[in-house]
Image (tube, helix red, strand yellow):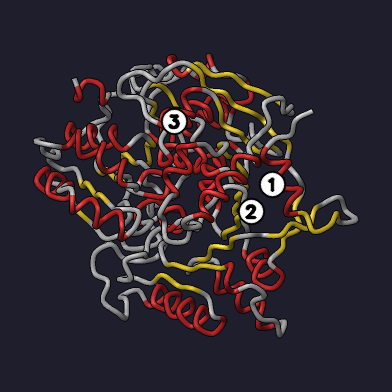
Amino acid sequence: MGRSLLDKVWDLHSVRELPGGQTQLLIGLHLIHEVTSPQGFQMLEDAGLSVLCPERTFATVDHIVPTELRRRPLRDAQAEEMLQAIEQNTKRHGIRFFPIGSGDQGIVHVIGPELGLTQPGQTIACGDSHTSTHGAFGAIAFGIGTSQVRDVLASQCLALARPKVRRIRVSGRLGFGVYAKDVILHIIRRLGVNGGVGYAYEYAGPVIERFSMEERMTICNMSIEGGARVGYVNPDATTFDYLRGRRFAPQGDAFERAIGWWRGIASDADARFDDEVGIDGGEISPTVTWGTNPGQAIGVAENLPRLEDLPDADRSAAEEAYQFMGLVPGRPLAGTPIQVAFVGSCTNGRISDLREAARVARGGKVAPGVRALVVPGSEAVRVEAEREGLHEIFMSAGFQWREAGCSMCLAMNPDKLVGRELCASSSNRNFKGRQGSPTGRTLLMSPAMVAASALAGRVTDVREVMR
């Protein structure tokens, strides 16, 4: 019987089985940033330990960095303290660091693939829940807590339970104006925000195979929002073409040899899975969240679900979400006025996302009263966007063009919602208070939908704008 990619990668990195049933797993690549690493380094030093494999650890800054004024010291004393901590810790332990202004700084899940650090068959860990992004390359990647950051720094290993594997096949063809973000929101809507607990999601099928690497990253990024700590796509020619020539990828003959190994770790044709789900991509429409978790979503042309039409288990949470969001069951979501539009994040802050948003924004004007931000996912994305003239399109339309960082996705920097502002956002979470205001509200959607909504000043079906 064939084996899945997860089983192959897991077994290759297994150091030993622990008495409690967990596996001591070797971590091939450890990515760190300024928010969750200081505690890990402190615990390491308190125990009198050093970093075991500094050559396998790479650092950047993303969560708290300003996207406007970056002069040091930063205005925010706590943010400045975090920057100084990662600067000192990486220097003390000999860890490669990509600081602001290096040309390589950016969101950790954007720069890893950009630099070729992320490769098929790896085990990858990072103190951030959206580490699942790197599964797009056929890696087993997961977010970890601060004590686990310490464990990886000290031992390059983690104690983990092997998840079951659910294969999600997306068949058919996507319709006009439907993007990877719509696909993953549709999947989470259907399977639920807890549907993936205990599972790794293997994404497969013609729609996934036709996706670019950046689209695959969007899908894998939000696996965690569906409860799956791990999401991955089997490596193929699209993966190898993306990695070829990247700085930290194998070079020359070594790259060709690596392709042979990478092909071998893909799931076998006769692999058996713990569960399988089929989804018709042709039935997916541009999708928008209406509630306070990513599973509370509908097609933009649908009416909001009525409470009596929801399963009993979902009604209480839906009623609470409607009260918080100020939306009325049974009414259309399209046409709802917004006050903020945000294009960015580790889900949708890559160059292809900015191209799609710019395609919609070209020649238009942001509606009066709407604050619209475009935040590149990395310094490299910003440079490429400016080389293509995308920044001029955005600024001409009235968008603010910013420096790289996580920005308003989780608002740990000055980019925050104010009061009950409603934000059309290309980010990954719509939890209460996620974007910096306890009463601020978030509607998740694709970057193209964000741009369309910014121009109209209300939730808008991007297909109407692009016709």
Q: Residue tagged by mark 1? A: 9
Instruction: Measuring from the top left, give residue 229's x and y in whole percent.
Output: 62, 44
Q: Secondary structure at mark 1?
A: helix
N-terminal of the pair, mark 2 or mark 1, is: 1
From what the image shows, is residue 416 above or below residue 186?
below
| Number of residues whose C-alpha sits closer than 10 Å to that of mark 1, classed few (under 14), some (14–19) or many (20 or more) | some
Q: Quadrant of the N terminus?
A: top right
Q: Are marks 2 and 1 in contact (CB under 8 Å)?
A: yes
Instruction: Measuring from the top left, give residue 226's x and y in whole percent.
Output: 57, 36
Q: Amino acid at mark 1?
A: Val
At a point 30% along the width and 60% down the height, the residue shown is 379
Mark 2 and mark 1: Cα distance apart in space: 7 Å
Displayed quadrant of residue 151: bottom right
| Number of residues whose C-alpha sits closer than 10 Å to that of mark 3, classed few (under 14), some (14–19) or many (20 or more) | some
Q: Residue tagged by mark 3? A: 322
- Extreme-front residue of the structure: 253
From what the image shows, is residue 389 above or below residue 465?
below
N-terminal of the pair, mark 3 or mark 2, is: 2
Q: Residue tagged by mark 2? A: 123
Mark 1 and mark 3: Cα distance apart in space: 43 Å
